[in-house]
Image (tube, grey):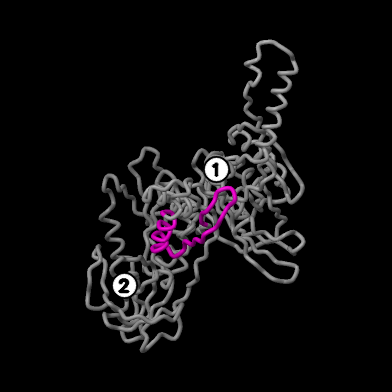
Amino acid sequence: MDFTYEVSRSLAACEGALLIVDAAQGVEAQTMANFYLALENDLAIISVINKIDLPSAEQERIRRQLEDVLGLEGEDAILTSAKQGIGTQEVLEAIVKHVPPPSGSVDEPLKALVFDSFFDSYQGVVVYIRLMEGEIHAGMKIKLMFNNRVYEVQRVGVFAPKMFPVDELSAGDVGYFTASIKNIHDVQVGDTVTGNAHPADKPLAGFKKVKPMVFAGLYPTDSSQYEPLRGALERLSLNDTSFSYEPENSHALGFGFRCGFLGLLHMEIIQERLEREFNLSLIVTAPTVVYQITKKKGEIVFLDNPTHLPSPQEVERIEEPIVDATVIVPAEFFGGVLALLQDKRGEQKSFEYLDDKTVLIKYRLPLNEIITDFYDRLKSCSKGYASFDYDLAGFAESSLVKLDILVNTQVVDALSTIVHKDKAYYYGRRLAERLKEIIPRQLFEVIIQCSIGNKVLARETVRPLRKDVIAKCYGGDITRKRKLLEKQKQGKRRMKQLGNVEIPQEAFMAVLKMD
């Protein structure tokens, strides 16, 4: 769901697609989303029912689903088993028979669709293209229509299946070219490549600039890993135009980076790659979405960090991103899934029974409610059988507030979050209770508070560790014991003023695991 736009551009470079449905699972939410993308691009669709060798396979039910849900001819679906090699020949023959040849004229001005790219240390950016019109060859001057930059083509080639250089590519071909492009951000997925000498009149339809929708802070657990983290982010951004990062400083966590992602899956991929490929140990703050803030002076700003939220006196209204969600779930779990969607401030649009066992639910949900624990809870309440997909549907005004976490009166900015006003007290109280369990005991009292502005919603206290200072007293005057206890009390008061509380990584993960 995070990469829907990239998938749509890849489909736009094709004439046909295979719609592969699991014989045991049936049509899922992702199946429907990609099916409609293929329809929008007028692709020839060949339906395939896979895994027919499984004991739980229900071919006839899946055929009916293809007819009722997607409007395809169920009888035309090809039965296959990739594990046993059943139906492979039939699929290849269906591709030859049903997928039309590419169209386009070599005499027209060059018009090519960019559907992918990657950075090569020796050649610069390697651009994957599908030629709709015209031709391209080495030595030719080309222009990227989004930013009007002109380059000279160094090499062109095709995939066979590895990259294989050729003299030229013409209308209908799929291949690649290099042109000594140094910055991958100059090449946008969905952009149109045309000739500089004889440019096309207008670019291909469907292009849009991809913007990050989910933001989170990445901090090294050891301050000495800050520079390695910066280098790792630079290397990752070379091959991912949708990933953004900028330095930021947190009072609680030190120096780190504020990173932008397409969604939660994209964030998890980046985090895994940083930890596995670059051997980094990271603290990831709670993810947040982009909010649209309208100030009372009429200025509109986009906010991706809760700590930068203007004061309530300056804000006219706050709008949060909304998504149109599709959930496909077995009928026996229908009630539990509906309760979850309602709990996430969802607004029901429709639901229908696809067959006697499966329900299709359509809801409108705030993106902020589904970027943390929603997917885990959906899988839990449906025993793993529910599938989920969503599309962004713009912004909507909502009653939102910033919830701050204070540890010994000091705001922990990395734990600040924006929540709905109706949920603020309940969320803050539970978060304070979780932090009390996670933050280790010190030699002094640690006070945890959740507040909105100056109003404290919840408070918890981590009791101090106590040294038995009177253990060495074997009798004698009671005033000696009182003197030692009073001295200890004063020492604890000084420690509370000067001592630092180290907040473990589990505290930041607690924000993600709230359910």
Residue type highlighted by circle 1: Met
- Using residue 326 as the reference point, say whether residue 84 is left or right of it: left
Horizontal and vertical percent position of residue 474: 65, 11
Is 74 or 386 nearer to us in this picture? 386
Residue at 49% across, 60% down:
245
Graded by Cα atoms within 10 Å as few (under 14), some (14 to 19) or many (20 or more), the crowding at tag 1 reads some
Give the vertical position of 341 relative to 466 (above or below): below
Question: Disc 2 designates what residue?
Answer: 101
Graded by Cα atoms within 10 Å as few (under 14), some (14 to 19) or many (20 or more), the crowding at tag 2 reads few
Element under label 1?
A: helix
Q: Quadrant of residue 407?
A: top right
Is 417 or 168 nearer to us in this picture? 417
Give the vertical position of 387 relative to 260 (above or below): above
Give the residues in magenta.
228-257
Horizontal and vertical percent position of residue 191: 43, 74
| Count of all numbered marks drawn on residues in the image | 2
Sequence-first tag of 2 and 1: 2
Between the C-alphas of marks 2 and 1, the distance is 52 Å
Question: Looking at the rendering, in which quadrant would you find the C terminus?
Answer: top right
Magenta stretch contains residue 242: yes
Give the vertical position of 328 relative to 244 (above or below): above
Q: Residue furthest top?
A: 475
Residue at 34% across, 70% down:
125
Question: Disc 1 designates what residue?
Answer: 509
Q: Residue furthest bottom?
A: 197
Residue type highlighted by circle 2: Pro
